[in-house]
Image: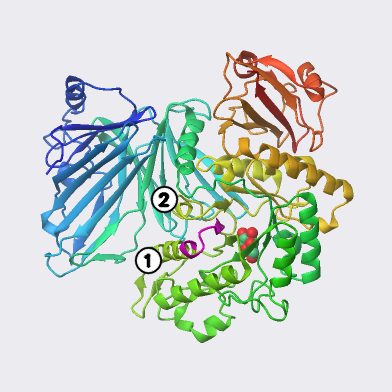
Amino acid sequence: MPDTTARILTLRAAGTSLVVELAEPVPRVLHWGADLGELTEDGLAALALTGEPAVLNNSIDIPRRFTVWPTEADGWSGTPAHQGHLAGTAAAPRLSLTGTSYRPQAEGGELSLDLTDPGAALDVTVTYRLEPSGVLGVQTRIGRRPDAAPEPYDLAQVTTMLPLPRRAAEILDFTGKWSRERSPQRRPLGFGTYAREVRRGKPGLDSPYLVTVGVPGFGFGHGEVWGVHLAWSGDQRYLVEQLPEGAGTHAAVLGGGELLRPGEIRLAPGESYTTPVCHFTWSDQGLDGLADRFHTLVRARPAHPRTPRPLILNSWEAVYFDHDLDRLLRLADKAAEVGVERFVLDDGWFRGRRSDHAGLGDWTVDPVVWPEGLTPLVDHVRSLGMEFGLWVEPEMVNLDSDLAREHPDWVLGPARGVGPSSRHQHVLDLANPQVWDYLLGALDALVDKYGIAYLKWDHNRELHEAVHGGADRPVAHAQVLALYRLIDALKERHPGLEIESCASGGGRIDLGILARTDRVWASDCNDPVERQMIQRWTAQLLPPELIGAHVGSGTSHTTARVSSDAFRLTTALFGHAGIEQDITRCAPEELARLTAWAALYRELRPLLHGGRTVRADLAGDATLLHGVVAHDGAAALYCWARVATSPEGQSGRVQLPGLAPEATYRVRVRTELGLPSFHQTSGPAWLTTALDDWLTLPGAVLTVAGLPMPNLNPDQALLLEVRRND
Ligand code: GLA
């Protein structure tokens, strides 16, 4: 029974709130969005009264409510909160409230609602946790009572939903492909169900990522927006649904959940299913406001990296599979010379791995290519003062490997045989304890032996026909849980170990994997034009210190576009920076620039990795202005980039977002990386001064009136530093 006598319960934090009424039989959501302030009992009663909609023509004869667990029992004709059956029966869930636990805190708090469905002997607990960041995490546990009839309950789907008002009428979500992740797409919200379903066994390169609905025209710095992100690294489903009759007094719903395969979750008496956390966020400060809440949430993780993010050199685009000790020693020498702090040996080091056709699964060092093991390289790297990192792809297997030959039954797939390979590889059945033990043992041995500081954990193919055990039981859900357990166990054995989540680039970026990893590889594309966009949108969820950003070679390996050093270096500065090119071939002036960049990165990373990410709303995508502003407002760094030409000659005055109009600032251009090439003769006047020295300007000019920006040639960027005068 309720642990509170109040009927209407509120969670409030950081300007947002959730209000739930303990209505019978199922509580309903009265409000989610802007904080309504400290409402008196009368105020709350008024909210409940005005939460009662009209009874429409040709409709159920009571006001339709949007409950915390919408089902047809409330007259809800939209997507139900859960679906399932008991051997073809008990298909009409009818829940009622049995208990409440309410623990508000000064900022946020938790509300849990216990519901029961006697027909299927199901107990449901929905938990709302409002974090101090204002992000609302919702998680549900559905359990079968221990004394239930023995047939398993087939749980088909669980969807967590919160209501949206009518003014939320434009959707922004993401798609993408290899080397072009997080491509934004916008559309008006119509009637019906807009659903994004992911059946790749990971969020995918086209991950919906963060589904946002807002007042049409919302931008980075303005507009009211509601977003949802699912902290899950497997199959998933997002939806925005609007029915003509609305959702109670609300207009539509926003939600998501794990996409379950038929028969995947079958609850025997005493068993339960727990959903991934669905993170809901509201802001009246546009997409930057949403991003800020997520960054605050992520930075509050107990395991969030708190040490300076070491500058990386990754060997992939430098040597690919051509692992030659002398060559790698020279690469390490140059890396140390320019100021690299972590050297990462990418794919190609393990048994039989001379190309991507063979070797995955055989996680011991190749004795032919590395006759003395990795020790000579590791020792050298460490003697140069750098940490050592290693690439692995534990969940995968090439059929051309000793592992697959010895244990063909460890490969995930139907009893009739595995389907087509992808990048010549298949997936291991992680839910098989023998596979799991083998992987933990192999990884543990490597980390132990070589004192590995960092694993780049890859996942290059999608899961198809993820079934096992002769009877073809679906196991995509179990696979993700086994992966989480594997990473957790490895980290428990090696507490300082950092792990990067990579999946052909940014194919596995979600707050589930990030609960146990330390950064993501945003994309295999190091082309700075593409990267400007990929990083800008990856930052919608993650702060820059978690987003791997490397300087590739002048000619991009993925797009063949040629770009200047300065543009590539400036672009890679706004993340967890690294180098991904064969710097043994760099001319001395290129090395000098890399060295200056490394020093700049070390200087600026406390700001870049701790501040608030801001992005300006400009007309069109040809120019971008983004930056990071320190939380105390004392410093900021902006990047003014041009990725294409555009018809206008003058930018006009451009507002630098995030500064205080009443403060006074000094502004200067950082020139260590070289100057961009300009598409103009000179000026604007302020720039000429700021190129030489600090220029003092009022905040009102910088952030309200705006600065006229120089016209750059395409693929160029200007780095602007701002300091507040105290
Ligand atoms: C994936 C990754 C790359 C690289 C290769 C190695 O494609 O995204 O960065 O590690 O695998 O095979």
The answer to whether one can see residue 579 in this image is yes
Q: Nearer the viewer, residue 291 or 339?
A: 339
Sequence-wise first label, 1 or 2: 2
Toward which corner of the image does residue 539 lie, by quadrant? top right
Q: Which residue is mark 2?
A: 231
Q: Residue lying furthest bottom in this view? A: 406
Residue 276: x and y, percent?
Answer: 36, 53
Left or right of residue 90: residue 420: right
Q: Residues within 10 Å of mark 2 (few under 14, many from 20)?
A: many
- At label 2, the amino acid type is Ala
Left or right of residue 569: residue 699: left
Image quadrant where one finds the N terminus: top left
- At label 1, the amino acid type is Ala
The answer to whether one can see residue 70 in this image is no
Residue 557: x and y, percent?
Answer: 73, 56
Residue 597: x and y, percent?
Answer: 76, 42
Residue drawn at the location 58% of the way across and 30% of the way down: 630
Q: Which mark is residue 478?
A: 1
Residue 552: x and y, percent?
Answer: 73, 51
Toward which corner of the image does residue 688 lie, by quadrant? top right
Left or right of residue 664: residue 233: left
Image quadrant where one finds the C terminus: top right
Left or right of residue 447: residue 171: left
Residue drawn at the location 48% of the way across and 29% of the way down: 286
> Range of the magenta residues?
491-502
Instruction: Residue 498: say if magenta.
Output: yes
Question: Under tag 2, what secondary structure?
Answer: loop
Q: Residues within 10 Å of mark 1 (few under 14, many from 20)?
A: some
Instruction: Residue 293: say if magenta.
Output: no
